[in-house]
């Protein structure tokens, strides 16, 4: 942040506001405090019988690697609406959400992943704009060496482990670097 | 947003960026796209034997009403670290987190609440800076008519219902207005 988005002043300083306990960008001209907070990435692992649907990324980062359909949550939506929207945008598939499978924090980049799981409504899926391929994988077929992000690996491992147990629960984890 | 925080230009327009599907604030001068996304509120319901700890808000909104200790997640922390930090800031209490109890979206104000639950480490608690009182309540003592936010009501109801069942799970809900 170089300029105040409220008044346009370039006199922005990192200071601790009164009553706060950490530094924020504060405009010395209009006193606006500019907060910065983590972003939420929402997604859903689509399930069909014993298989799950992954998308191959056609854009960076991790272009060419496989991923649980997910993306930044948008204003004006619930977490479930965001997860269903991301599945549709990336794989043109519709899912019915069963529950939250994983919660995964990456504090270094100020992100929180929420991956749901749920059944595909039908087998009508295809690559979306940021995806070059979409495929159903059984557990044995998962390309473990070509998974795009650790959040997706975390989700896939817990999905198959919970399925073996016969009951699903929410798992929380973090990438601490 | 009235000025570009990157270059200071006042020529900010709501437009759909190439490859996107919704309007963003874009600077016509330096082409920076200014994204706005929902914020995460993290908290934890502290438990001691058959009672839970609530804090009475000493600031607006909902000053004087009781709340599950919670607040905005900060950059650089995991969701659990944020929840424990908020409990400590509001009630000077330390908790050991057991799990995520509720996930609660409020799309109208672009917020997602995540309330964990967990045992108090000891009975050392007191009002923090934004709190005027801190008290342990049994289920029968909960001041249902004086709960600050619907997210806290959602959490308290699910906590006591799950406790009766003898097993806790993650519940997702939303305030749709």
Image (spheres, coloured by chain):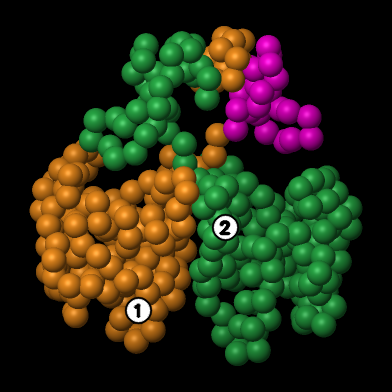
Chain colours: A orange, B green
Q: Is residue A118 above or below residue B163?
A: above
Q: Which residues are magenta?
A: A13-35
Between disc 2 and disc 1, the foreground one is: 2
Considering depth in this image, is B4 or B177 the residue closer to the camera?
Answer: B177
Residue A169 locus on image (x, y percent) = 44, 76
- For mark 2, what is the residue? B177
Residue visible at 28% across and 37% down? B20
Residue B165 at x, y percent in the picture? 60, 90
In this rendering, position of residue A157 left or right of residue A5 = left
For the residues bearing labels 2 and 1, Cβ distance under 8 angstroms: no
Q: Residues within 10 Å of mark 2 (few under 14, many from 20)?
A: few
Can residue B129 be seen from the camera position used here?
yes
For mark 1, name the chain: A
Residue at x-position 47% and y-position 41%: B37
Q: Could you give the CA–CA distance between mark 2 and mark 1, rounded to whole angstroms? A: 35 Å
Q: The numbered mark 2 sits on a residue in which chain?
A: B
Q: Are marks 2 and 1 on the same chain?
A: no
Q: Which quadrant would residue B100 be assigned to in this image?
A: bottom right
Residue that sits furthest to the front in the current view: B177
**Residue named by callout 1:** A162
Horizontal and vertical percent for residue B77? 55, 46
Q: Main secondary structure of the magenta part?
A: loop
Any part of residue B125 in sight:
no
């Amino acid at each position: 942040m170089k300029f105040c988005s409220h008044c346009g002043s370039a006199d922005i300083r990192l200071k601790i506001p009164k009553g706060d306990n950490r530094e924020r960008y504060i405009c010395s001209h209009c006193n606006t405090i500019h907060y910065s907070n983590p972003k939420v990435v929402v997604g859903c692992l689509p399930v069909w019988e014993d298989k799950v649907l992954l998308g191959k990324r056609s854009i960076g980062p991790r272009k060419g690697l496989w991923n649980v359909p997910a993306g930044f949550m948008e204003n004006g939506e619930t977490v479930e609406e965001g997860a269903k929207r991301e599945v549709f945008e990336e794989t043109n598939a519709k899912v019915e959400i069963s529950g939250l499978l994983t919660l995964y924090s990456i504090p270094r980049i100020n992100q929180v992943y929420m991956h749901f799981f749920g059944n595909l409504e039908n087998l009508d899926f295809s690559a979306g704009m940021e995806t070059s391929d979409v495929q159903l994988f059984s557990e044995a077929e998962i390309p473990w060496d070509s998974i795009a992000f650790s959040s997706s690996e975390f989700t896939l491992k817990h999905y198959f482990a919970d399925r073996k147990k016969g009951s699903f629960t929410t798992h929380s984890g973090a990438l601490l670097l």
